[in-house]
Amino acid sequence: MPDNVTSLFRSTAAHSPSMAALTRESDGAGPVDFCIPCNPYFPTPAMFEEMASRLRDIITYYPSSADTITAELCSLLQLPPQCVAMGNGSTELITWIDHLLVRESLAVPVPTFGRWTDQPMETGKRVDMFPLQESSGFALDLAQYAEFIRARGTRVAVICNPNNPDGGFLHKHAVVQFMDAMADLDLVVIDESFLEFADAENEPSVVHEAMLRPNVVVLRSLGKNFGLHGIRFGYLVANPALAGRVRSMLPKWNLNSFAEHVVFMLKEHGAEYAQSLHQVRRDRMDMSGQLSSLPGLTVYPSQGNFLFVRLPVGAEGTVVRDRLLTEHRILVRECGNKIGSSSRFLRLVVRPQVDVRRLVTGLEQVLYGTSRRGAAVSEQATGTAYSSGTAAVDRLVSQTNGAGTRGLAQAAGAGMPLPAAASAPAVGPGGGMPVPAAAGLPQPEPQPVPQEAPRPQPAPQPVPQPVPVPQPVPVPQPQQFPQPAAYPEPAPQPAPAAPPLAPAAAFAAPAPAPAPMQVPPATGPTPPGVPARGGLTAAQVRGTDGLSMAPATGWPGAQSWPDAAGVGQAAG
């Protein structure tokens, strides 16, 4: 594939150019796609042939109304149609959720699907980003997330389960407890776009629990699990009032004829669909094992149809991406433009074993220098040097109101890594994770540290005096969620005390406890464009002046159809 194809990445506002654009710029054949998270086994070849035979009628005539298509989908899912709204892709539904149901602020863990951060920013909402820590495998601690939401006074909370791009999974009972703990919020969104590929639990979906609650919306995708991103269709499930409010704003023909045709043919192909999901889960295990064997490559646990990997020390994601595309005709998702991630991370879609072997061969040649262009890694390191995983947030914080965000991260126990002021970051014992500095707070005097180099004088050096160790602070148990406060009154402020330690802070060098963070009391909803409690506004995140826009119980026929989460009837 010619080198000029990689210029398409710099000329698109999306994370990657479309497959159509890549095909036009090449010799007419697109690359092997490890970028777009799509089911490679469904529809079956026979289904594609059937659709091709009906192509003229499908694209010539108007589709049925969205109500007709939704009713057919609900008959398959065994969901009441009044609790469902279908959209032209999940992004259309995210847009309407933002316009109709998000008043002033939204909390979301990062990194995650970009529309959950970008969409509310574009409409002037405050987005409170809770950083997932690389040191804990990007796992989401719901108790800490709940603390973060209470401290911020956020009115809408979002959870993606499994999360994109890392594939982190939350069990159903934990999600339900979180939903109930956040019952006083305006809205709780559970994005289950990739839940069909999970196999950690038999019935992980919370769609039925959402229908019984006044402020919960569950978002589901169809294009991903049906392998048809180009059709653009998805749906949400909520109580009739919330679902009806979104449904009333959608155009009568917001679903196209291809979407109608696929929905109506599904009841004849339940067994093939269940088998396709089962095969993706098997391929995920095999692919994870093959990638984990590559030196210096870290593969994180995933319940999605993709794997989140950290490249070896010294590898730059954009270089690896471009060389895989031009030298091996392989398209991967480089995650440097995801808030909360960096260019050291790739998201790789689960594909059949023959494609995975091609990917592994390409990575070996690009990373370790078995090709004519040498290695993308300048020097193969033996350690696991720390990479913050929050490069975008770090850069923004350093240019805006970093002190407030640092204090907030410590108070919430998140321990968000931030750029150190000195040329070299402070590290814990044994060269561990850098210790984030509490900017904006009184800094302790630097303590002498024994040097590794040989001392020029034979006389023994004085032993440094021990530094007082702060008293341990109780850490909340995983399911102990903060109690809600009556809105619009702010959550009660804790008595002055040292903030809770983040999990990684237990390994940090001892230091005097910083002064407690001073948080001004809230007087009500924060207007758009005004930083609340030390956070970043959408304008600050996007680098603008703030005045302009920023650039189911089961399926009919239990013998073949899986349950609403896509796992109940899978073979094996």
Image: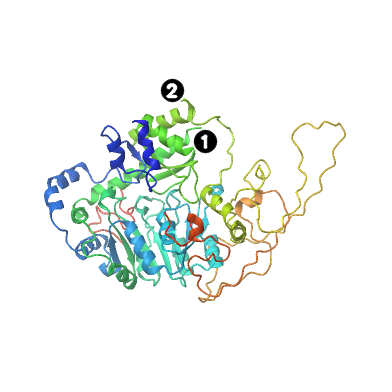
Say if mark 2 contacts mark 1, CB within 8 Å: no
Q: Tell me: 43 left or right of 145.
A: left
Q: Residue at x 59, y 62 (%)?
A: 476
Q: Residue furthest top?
A: 372
Q: For this rendering, which residue is in front, 296 or 517? A: 517
At a point 86% along the width and 36% down the height, the residue shown is 460
Image quadrant for the N terminus? top left
Q: Residue under label 1, please give it.
A: 312
Residue at point 50%, 56% (across, down): 541
Residue 212: percent from left, percent from top = 36, 71
276 or 91: nearer the viewer: 91
Colour setup of the view: rainbow
Q: Is residue 480 visible?
A: no
x%, y% of residue 42?
26, 46
Using residue 166 as the reference point, say whether residue 136 is left or right of it.
Answer: right
Label located before the other in sequence (2 or 1): 1
Among the 4 quarters of the image, the one containing residue 424: top right
Marks 2/1: CA–CA distance = 20 Å
Q: Amino acid at mark 1?
A: Pro
Q: Amino acid at mark 2?
A: Arg
Residue 372 bears which disc, if any?
2
Is residue 504 visible in the rendered image? The answer is: yes
Q: Secondary structure at mark 1?
A: loop
Q: Residues within 10 Å of mark 2 (few under 14, many from 20)?
A: few
Element at label 2: loop
Task: Please identify, in this view, whether the residue under mark 2 or under mark 1 is nearer the observer.
Answer: 2
